[in-house]
Image (cartoon, grey):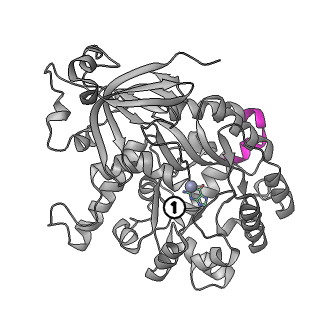
Amino acid sequence: MSQPSQELFGHLLSPQADGRVDLKRGRVVLRDGWIESVESVEHTGSTAGAQRFDESGVNSRSCVISPGFVDAHLHLPQFDSIGADGLSLLDWLNTQVFPAEARWADANYASAMSRRVAARLLASGTTGVCAFATVHHVATLAAMRGLEAFGLHGYVGQTLMNRGGPPELNRTTSQLLEELAATPAAGSIRPIVSPRFALSCSMDLMQGAAQLAHERDWPVQTHYAETVPECQRVREAFGEDSYLSVYDRAGLLGPRTLLAHAVWMSDHERARLAESGTVVAHCPTANLFLNSGLMDLASMRTAGVRMALGSDVAGGPDVCMVRVARAMLETARDRALMVGTSRRVPSEGVPTAADCWWQITRGNAEMLGMADAGRIEPGCRADLVVLTPADGPSATPAWLSQPDPLAALLYGFDERWIERVYARGQVAFRR
Ligand code: GUN
Ligand code: ZN
């Protein structure tokens, strides 16, 4: 049965097809989990629309309505490991991450944790994800159902690893591929082929994974070139000149593949990424937390590599994608300072605030093939974040009178601004 429609009024932060982000006062009508219509207040006749703003909280003059954020790379079983500082990638995996993931052998534990994680994501404005679970099949299914029950959408993958971890996390190639092949979608949470990274997988596992992805038309996610020692070990283990050649040989590259990190690479690898249409999930907060390096976003853009953005929790300590986007900007600015192009304002190759908002909404949705997410347009999922930026008494909100209101919202952002989050048209978080 059709539910009554709901109307929301505010400044609509609306990412456009050409990469711009519009910010206009308007009205969004939600029905049955979808956006039914969108009108700007100007179009409805200013007074009729304006009267619908009340002066407090949601629907106030200063409230901002954004599409729900999409996190293109994170690890569900790692949320209790945030902040394990002082280790580099491979030591951190061995001493912090693998023991945490081993606990998912208990599917009830995994189910409860996933629900807790779903609530945490929603409270930070994230409504779409592309996530790793663990090597455990039953726990992965439980995690998919847990996220679905909270109204999230996207992808969750059973981690594929047959080497390099503790015995309890190394499974056989045939077990892993059979389980993966038998993974149904849980509503809006769909399976994704998830070889952990080259050091956790034999070539036959990666090739089998690539074949399954091809047969099922499923996406692929893995990690790539995050740290220097990792790259060196991969080249040695597989006898290839470059890390990317290993994935290329396995058949893992292509427009439906997402490679997390991509910090340490040659121009040749960048060109191959662009040519194959492979997507890189930039993880600036994780690259900083684990001291991995500062990814060269400017060179990625120049080479034409398709880019997404991920929190990589718990490699990254920030759950909220607005902070991750700000770290993307600041990392690019740091690099520009280091190489001396920084004296120009704005610095070349440094994303703008609009780029940041675009990336965590429409940009990530497009890179993940989520055709109906990340936008405030009729026919899209009613996944919305309602923000009430802290404000003075003036009729014009302070952030709106800044030269770049999107920058004011990005730099001033505070999670306490998140008043409500709608997932599939339902209030999934309320402050
Ligand atoms: N490389 C392989 N596994 C992982 C992981 O869980 N997190 C990060 N940041 N890098 C990885
Ligand atoms: Zn990761």
Going by the numbered disc 1, the residue's amino acid type is Ser
- Is residue 384 on the magenta stretch? no
| Residue 153 point in image, percent of width and height | 59, 39
Ligand 1 quarter of the rendering: bottom right
224 displayed left or right of 136:
left
Give the mark count: 1
Front in this rendered view, residue 427 or 241? 427
Front in this rendered view, residue 45 or 141? 45
Please name the residue shown 37% across and 68% down the image.
Answer: 301
Please name the residue shown 47% across and 78% down the image.
Answer: 271
Picture quadrant where residue 209 is located: bottom right
In the displayed structure, would residue 14 be above or below residue 231? above
Q: State whether residue 135 appears in this view.
A: yes
Q: Which residue, given by chain and number where applicable, does mark 1 sit on?
A: 88
| Residue 61 point in image, percent of width and height | 25, 22
Magenta stretch: helix, strand or loop mostly: helix
Local SS, label 1: loop
| Residue 410 point in image, percent of width and height | 29, 42
Front in this rendered view, residue 179 or 372? 372
Q: Which residues are magenta?
A: 101-110
185 displayed left or right of 338:
right
| Residue 314 point in image, percent of width and height | 53, 47
